[in-house]
Image: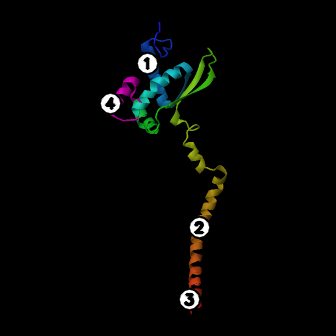
Amino acid sequence: MRHGKKFNHLGRTASHRSAMLSNMACSLIEHKRINTTVAKAKALRVYVEPLLTKAKEDTTHNRRIVFSYLQNKEAVTELFRTVAPKIAERNGGYTRIIKTGFRPGDAADTALIELVDFNELYNPNAEEKKTTRRSRRSATAPKKEAVVAEAPVVEEKAAEPTAEAADSTEEKTEE
């Protein structure tokens, strides 16, 4: 009986389940998104989000705790070097699960689980990039900037004689 057992056993023994979740977490950290079933994605989210929270503070103790779960040095290094700085400001919700339909062989409900801060399409920082990027004007902008860059130099030379001429006219009017 499963009284009071809230997590999904995924039809596996405890050792098989922990090994599978560890491998899936390493793959998620390495590739930033993986395709799997919805049930496994939900179980992986519960497994990996506390590890991501631990990675926000880079201490030897936290590295050892994360390594005890992942058992993969490359994944731990990737987590602490590249993933942790990107999620430093986020207060949880590091992963996103997107349902992708049904698997052809057994009609299992499949999903894509990804790290939120590594998706360029849904990233809130992409709005800032869109304001600086203009596709039509970018082709003409460098030409205008080149002309504008040359024009002030010419205008400054032209502006100096006119300023002197204006001073000379003012002096003449004062006399």
Q: Position of residue 16 (x, y in %)?
A: 44, 14
Under mark 2, the amino acid is: Glu
Under mark 3, the amino acid is: Glu
For disc 2, the neighbor class at 10 Å (few under 14, some 14 to 19, many from 20) is few
**Residue on which disc 2 sits:** 150
Is the residue under label 4 in contact with that under label 3 (CB below 8 Å)?
no
**Residue on which disc 4 sits:** 61
Region rendered in magenta: 56-75
Q: Position of residue 47 (x, y in %)?
A: 45, 23
**Residue on which disc 1 sits:** 19
At numbered mark 2, what does the secondary structure look like: helix, strand or loop? helix
Upstream in sequence: badge 1 or badge 3: 1
Under mark 1, the amino acid is: Ala
Under mark 4, the amino acid is: His
- Pair 1/3: label in front: 3
Upstream in sequence: badge 4 or badge 1: 1
> Nearest the camera: 138 or 132?
132
> Nearest the camera: 109 or 88?
88
Upstream in sequence: badge 2 or badge 4: 4
User: In terms of image quadrants, where is residue 102?
Assistant: top right
> Is residue 144 visible to the viewer in this orientation of the structure?
yes
**Residue on which disc 3 sits:** 171
Upstream in sequence: badge 1 or badge 2: 1
Residue located at (48% from left, 26% from top): 27
Residue located at (47% from left, 23% from top): 46
